[in-house]
Image (cartoon, rainbow, N blue to C red):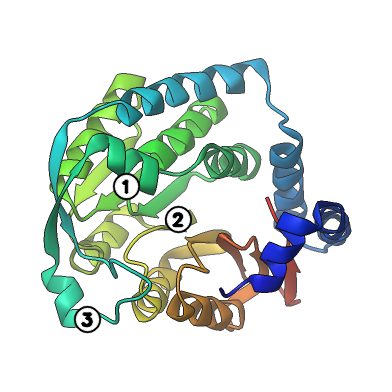
Amino acid sequence: MIYIQALWDLLYHPVHAALKNEQELARMKGSGSDTVKALASVADDVLNGTVTVGEAQWRDRIESLRTRMERSNEILSIADYGAQSPLKQLSAQTMYAGRVVTRSVREVCRSSSKPLKWSMFLFRLVRRLKPESLLELGTCLGISGAYIGAAMSMNGFGSLVTIEGAETLAAKAQTNFDTLGFRNIETVVGRFQDRLDAVLQKTGRLDAVLIDGHHDGAATLRYFETILPALAPGAVVVFDDIGWSMEMHEAWKMLRAHHSVGCSIDMFDMGICCIGGSVRETYRIAI
């Protein structure tokens, strides 16, 4: 509903949408920000399906894991501390109390794990920007964390701390990380607001952050403000589901206008904020 014109362009005018992408990517490549130029290359690679042999091997390993989970009928009891639905208007107290839902691994994987194109975007982002310290809010079953872990492994350095409110999901994710052989990913269990301060004290400076959980506009803004002092100059913050609800859309507009944000990139499903910089730049592309 929020992006009616954008959806019209993508669904009914693909040539027009491709042209707009080309124009925006050209602008990004001409940016004075090295980070924005790098992100343009990331988007190009994903749109063109560019992968090396080594990257394809990691992709295939993780997608094989995804396929197994999409076929799993294992039932999990999951503590949900988020907004639950774009149609609901839950109070902060209700979300904090949470609710327990029963779902199969298959259902969770198909509905909540990062699709391949966005997983590859995160993979390419870490490969290109080469962050040393990363934080993720919202582990789920660990698909996005696995792609980040694979990129760090190929880079030869980097560490990820990922926070998940549901203990059952965190356990599954950690099993997946162990299966893939990642030793540089730490899974922390608990509500974001309960665990974030302690995690930030431990991690120190952060080069990249992925906020992919809770899906409440006010909470998203609070997490950003809490994380902001820990961000290194030039850090990138990726916000998922920026069009999930009107509240998330309004939060995204406020984040783009934040005094600490130099450049922002709206990708309809995801948004990226680049911290710092003397010039404010805004872009919109469709992956």
Local crowd size for mark 3, using a 10 Å CA cut-off: few (<14), some (14–19), many (≥20): some
Above or below 67: residue 264? below
Q: CA distance from mark 1 to mark 3?
A: 21 Å
* Lower position in the chain sequence, tag 2 or tag 3: 3
Horizontal side of 88 relative to 125 (left or right) equals left
Q: Which amino acid, mark 3?
A: Ala
Residue 157: percent from left, percent from top: 49, 33
- Would you say the residues marked 2 and 1 are in contact, meaning their CB atoms lie under 8 Å apart? no
Which numbered circle lies on residue 210? 2
Which numbered circle lies on residue 117? none
* Lower position in the chain sequence, tag 1 or tag 3: 3
Task: For residue 283, say whether it is visible.
Answer: yes
- The secondary element bearing badge 1 is classed as loop
- The secondary element bearing badge 2 is classed as strand
* Lower position in the chain sequence, tag 2 or tag 1: 1
Residue 141: percent from left, percent from top: 30, 39
State the residue lying farthest toward the front. Answer: 12
Residue at the spot 76% in from the left edge and 51% down from the top edge: 40
Which numbered circle lies on residue 92? 3
Residue at the spot 24% in from the left edge and 36% down from the top edge: 105
Horizontal side of 97 relative to 260 (left or right) equals left
Q: Which amino acid, mark 2?
A: Leu
- Based on the displayed image, in which of its 4 quarters is residue 254 positioned? bottom right
- The secondary element bearing badge 3 is classed as helix
Which numbered circle lies on residue 139? 1
Q: Which amino acid, mark 1?
A: Thr
